[in-house]
Image (spheres, rainbow, N blue to C red):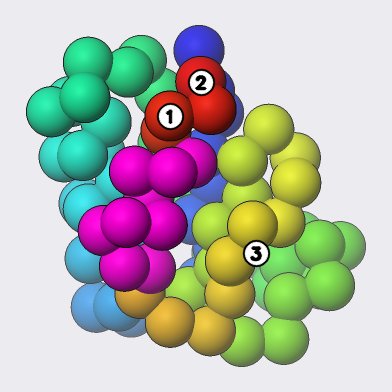
Amino acid sequence: MKTIKVLGSGCSKCEKTAEIITRLAAEAGVEVVVMKETDPAAMMGYGVMSTPAVVIDEQLVHSGSIPHRAEVEAWLAKA
């Protein structure tokens, strides 16, 4: 099971990112735990300067925008 963190302030883009990841994982039949991280200190720990950002299994994979469907599908395919 993958642990996916969506880093951000809780803005609409961050919420949408979490929703997209959750929906696409369900469609692909991949078990994931999607967590939202809003603590600025935690975000800085990953070196994130712009949100939303995505961390999968403690690796930063994306930041600064809502990820495209193909990107999310590629991340989930590595499960």
Q: Is residue 69 magenta?
A: yes
Left or right: residue 61 compared with residue 70: right
Q: Residue at x 36, y 15 (%)?
A: 31
Q: Which secondary structure lies at badge 1?
A: helix
Can you tell which mark lies on residue 52?
A: none
Judge depth for marks 3 and 1 and give the one in front.
Answer: 1
- Give, as a three-letter code, the residue at label 3: Asp
Left or right: residue 76 compared with residue 47: left
Q: Position of residue 48 (x, y in %)?
A: 73, 75
- Is residue 49 shown above or below 55? below
- Give, as a three-letter code, the residue at label 2: Ala
Q: Position of residue 43 (x, y in %)?
A: 72, 67
Q: Position of residue 14 (x, y in %)?
A: 36, 70
- Is residue 69 shown above or below 53? above
Q: Residues within 10 Å of mark 1 (few under 14, many from 20)?
A: few
Is mark 2 in CB contact (under 8 Å) with mark 1? yes
Of labels 2 and 3, earlier in sequence is 3
**On the image, numbered disc 1 is attached to which residue?**
77
Res. 32 image quadrant: top left
Query: What is the span of residues highlighted in magenta in the rendered image?
Result: 67-75
* Residue 15 in view (yes/no): no
- Give, as a three-letter code, the residue at label 1: Ala
Q: Which secondary structure lies at badge 3?
A: loop
- Is residue 40 shown above or below 20? below
Res. 11 image quadrant: bottom left
**On the image, numbered disc 2 is attached to which residue?**
79
Q: Which secondary structure lies at badge 2?
A: loop
Q: Nearer the viewer, residue 10 or 27?
A: 27
Can you tell which mark lies on residue 39?
A: 3
Q: Residue at x 58, y 75 (%)?
A: 63
Q: Residue at x 32, y 18 (%)?
A: 30
